[in-house]
Amino acid sequence: MSEDFVDLRKVGIERDPSKRSASFMMVDESPEVGFSRGVEILSTREAIERYEWLENYSWRLVEGEGDYDGYFIRVPRNVKVEFPVEACLLLKMAKSQRVHNIVIAEENSELNLITGCTSERLSGLHLGMSEFYIKRNAKVTFTMIHNWKRGNEVLPKTGIRVEENGVFISNYILLSPVKVVKACPVAYLERNSRAFFGSVVVGFEDSEIDIGNVVYLNGEGSSAEIVSRSISRGGKVFSRGHIIGNAENVKGHLECKGMIIGNGVINAIPELEARNPNVDLSHEAAIGKIAEDEIFYLMTRGLSRDEATSLIIRGFMDIEVKELPEVLKREIDRAIELVEKALV
């Protein structure tokens, strides 16, 4: 088994047509579509050249310009993609990688997308700009797994628009030491739409991680939940969440929990903003360490100290995401296992 393949497995990439509906690979700034069934997948540059109407989507949800390449994914109306679509962004030789992704889920469609980002370079810059359009009654589940090197700097921008009765579920997992990660996806929700953002982030020594989400509840009856689990093992972690209630009968909840192992810094920054009297917004935040009495209790039940610590960490990092397909649950579990082994 090659080292390249091992790295891709760490970020959820199978490259197996029997387990995926489509596959996309981008090495530095060179894209390649592997295969596709039931879903349209092209390079962004090719899609923009092919479809004039795509100008109405390109650079509408994130600030930027240019013809950066990346993946374009479109699920046709009423199509529910059976297996996940996978996309891998690999920083291999270049000093920087600039990516522009566009995802469109048409009305009544359903998509599960796994994006794995990794690097073979000890240092380098990744700029990933992604735009998600979830049409009426559509559902998109997006799982992003990061596995960087200690000298990498990662500065993505993401915008999401969820139309009436649409659903967007996002899972973010940071697996490895990294120099800097700064990411704050922004979502705009219309009438009766829903969004969930879950993250598991580990800040190793000398890492600076600044992760957050901003959600605008613009449509009546829309709702959002942001759940984050942050662990610092010598790194600096900022965990942010901001929900803005602009419409009648909207609901939002923030949950930020942090755990410090050894030396480290965690800042939990929840923010709620009500611009309408009929909103229901709430938050909870907590930061602490592994309690010795919990470790002692588990050791009295026959576990070693490392096994007890591992079990506590696993429980802390577990985030229950309703409506998540089993195949994506397995991807997340596998990612958490790798983090868990690195922490004990």
Image (cartoon, rainbow, N blue to C red):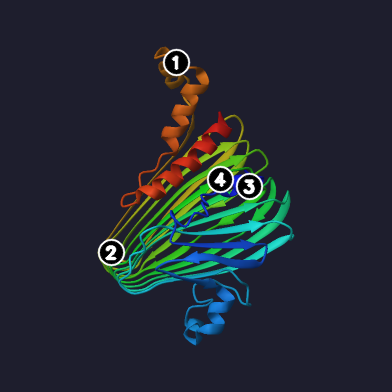
Q: Give how far apart the Cα atoms at labels 3 and 1 are.
A: 33 Å
Q: Hey, what amino acid is under mark 1? A: Met
Q: Is residue 2 left or right of residue 16?
A: right
Quickly name the residue at label 1. Answer: 299
Q: Give how far apart the Cα atoms at labels 4 and 1 are.
A: 31 Å
Q: Hey, what amino acid is under mark 4? A: Lys
Image depth: mark 4 or mark 2 in front: 4
> Contact (CB < 8 A) between labels 2 and 3?
no
Q: Residue at x 59, y 77 (%)?
A: 45
Quickly name the residue at label 4. Answer: 10
Q: Hey, what amino acid is under mark 2? A: Pro
Marks 1 and 2, the one that precedes in the sequence: 2
Q: Is residue 124 left or right of residue 254?
A: right
The image position of residue 142, as x and y in percent, is 44, 58
Marks 2 and 3, the one that precedes in the sequence: 3
Quickly name the residue at label 3. Answer: 208
Q: Is residue 170 above or below residue 2?
A: below
Marks 4 and 3, the one that precedes in the sequence: 4
> Which quadrant would the C terminus be assigned to in this image?
top right
Q: Residue at x 69, y 58 (%)?
A: 125
Quickly name the residue at label 2. Answer: 277
Marks 4 and 2, the one that precedes in the sequence: 4
Count all numbered tags in the image, as a single digit: 4
The image position of residue 128, as x and y in percent, is 59, 63
Q: Which picture quadrant has residue 138?
A: bottom left
> Contact (CB < 8 A) between labels 3 and 1?
no
The image position of residue 316, as x and y in percent, is 43, 35
Q: Mark 3, residues whose alpha carbon is within 10 Å: few (<14), some, or many (≥20)?
A: many
Q: Hey, what amino acid is under mark 3? A: Glu
Identify the element where label 2 is drawn. Answer: loop
Q: Residue at x 47, y 32 (%)?
A: 313
The image position of residue 18, as x and y in percent, is 43, 55
